[in-house]
Structure formats: structure tokens, C-alpha cells
Image (tube, helix red, strand yellow):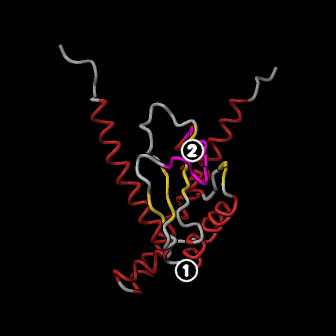
Amino acid sequence: MKDPRVYNPPMLHDLNVLLGAAAMERLTLFTNHLIASEPIALRKLALHSGRCMQLFLADWPKLLPPPPVAAFRITPAGLLEWCGGQGCAEPDLRLTLVASNPALELARAVAGSRPKVDVAGDALLATDLNWLFDNLRWDVEDDLSRIVGQAPAREISRVVGGIVAGLREVASSVTGRLTSARNAAAEPPRQ
């Protein structure tokens, strides 16, 4: 008789741990690339050297595999270091994001809206982190020009910019419809 389980839970857990760690390491590298491109950002973060911040995802759906621990320590150089799967014992800054519907939150982020985040802990670190969110931007064209040259990078950037604008418009429309549907479902029936 065939085993009724269609997957091997321990194997999926191990795969999730490996992929999650790899994703967090790449996210840390990308974030450090953005921070390093802005000397003011490096100086602001260097003031908080040794401090730890951690993102908590509240109400994560039980059907989805749990995301990796998102805890980062600030280095003396003003960059971030992922703390690994153990996180911070006592984070200096705790950021909590309601993630009961990750797809909707992702669509909202693509549409350009910022998620509602509950912040607890060091107020100065929170202020400097907010400054980073408001001011750091990825200069895709500059990075591309190092690989393919200035003219092709400008053209690729223009085309990708149009695609991103279209995706934002679609995401904005989808989130508007989902929000309307959620509000309609929450309203009591009219008599």
C-alpha cells in the first residue's frame, strides 16, 4: 500500500532552512550594497555599531513554511550582518509586521505602499533606520553600466522602468480590488 503522505516533512524543513539562509545572505549583501553606495547611510549606521534589530512577522499563515529569522547586527563599518537562524537574544529594535496575507502585502509593496510596522526599542536607531528607508534607492542604471556600458544600461533601465511602472499599476489595481472585497465581506448584510 502506498504511503498517504505526498511529501517528506523533514526533508521540506531542511530545504526551507537551506533556501531561507541563502535568501537572507543574498538580501544582506544587496542591502549592504545599497548602504555602501551612500556615505551618509554608513555614518548613520556606524553610530549604532553592535546593536541588533529583528523583524517579526506576526500571524504568518500556518500553511506556508516559516520564513527565516530576520535579525541583523550593525557592524563598526556601518553595514549589516545577518545573525543567522538564532536571531538576537534581546534586540535593541524590534520591528513587527502583520503578515497574515503575505501575497497582499507583497502586492502592496510592489504598488509602492509601505507596510504598517510596529516599532519598539531604541528610538534613535528607529529614526536612522526610517531615514534609510526614505532615502536609499538602488541606482540600477549605474550598476548595469559597469557591466554593459552606459548607453545599453540607459536603454535597459528605460525599458525596465516602463515594465516596473506597469507592474505597479497592476498591483495597485489588484490591492484596491482585494481591499474592496475584504471590506465588503466584513460589512454586515443589509436588510
- In the image, taking residue 71 as reference, residue 146 lies left or right, namely left
- Classify 10 Å Cα crowding around label 2: few (below 14), some (14-19), many (20 and above): some
Q: Position of residue 178 (x, y in %)?
A: 62, 41
Q: Residue furthest top?
A: 1
Residue at position x 59%, y 47% from top? 174
- Along the polypeptide, which appears first: circle 2 or circle 1? 1
Question: Disc 2 marks which amino acid?
Answer: Leu
Q: How many marks?
A: 2
- In the image, taking residue 128 as reference, residue 75 lies left or right, namely left
Residue on which disc 1 sits: 39
Question: Residue 46 lies in what quarter of the image?
Answer: bottom right
Most foreground residue, 132 or 157: 132
Residue on which disc 2 sits: 104
Question: Residue 127 lies in what quarter of the image?
Answer: bottom right
Most foreground residue, 69 or 63: 69
For the N terminus, which image quadrant?
Answer: top left
Magenta segment includes 93: yes
Bounds of the magenta segment: 88-101
For the C terminus, which image quadrant?
Answer: top right
Question: Residue 3 lies in what quarter of the image?
Answer: top left
Helix or strand or loop: what does disc 2 sit on?
Answer: helix
Most foreground residue, 93 or 119: 93
- In the image, taking residue 154 as reference, residue 177 lies left or right, namely right
Most foreground residue, 94 or 12: 94
Q: Position of residue 32 (x, y in %)?
A: 46, 68
- Classify 10 Å Cα crowding around label 1: few (below 14), some (14-19), many (20 and above): few
Magenta segment includes 146: no
Question: Disc 1 marks which amino acid?
Answer: Pro
Residue at position x 76%, y 24% from top? 188
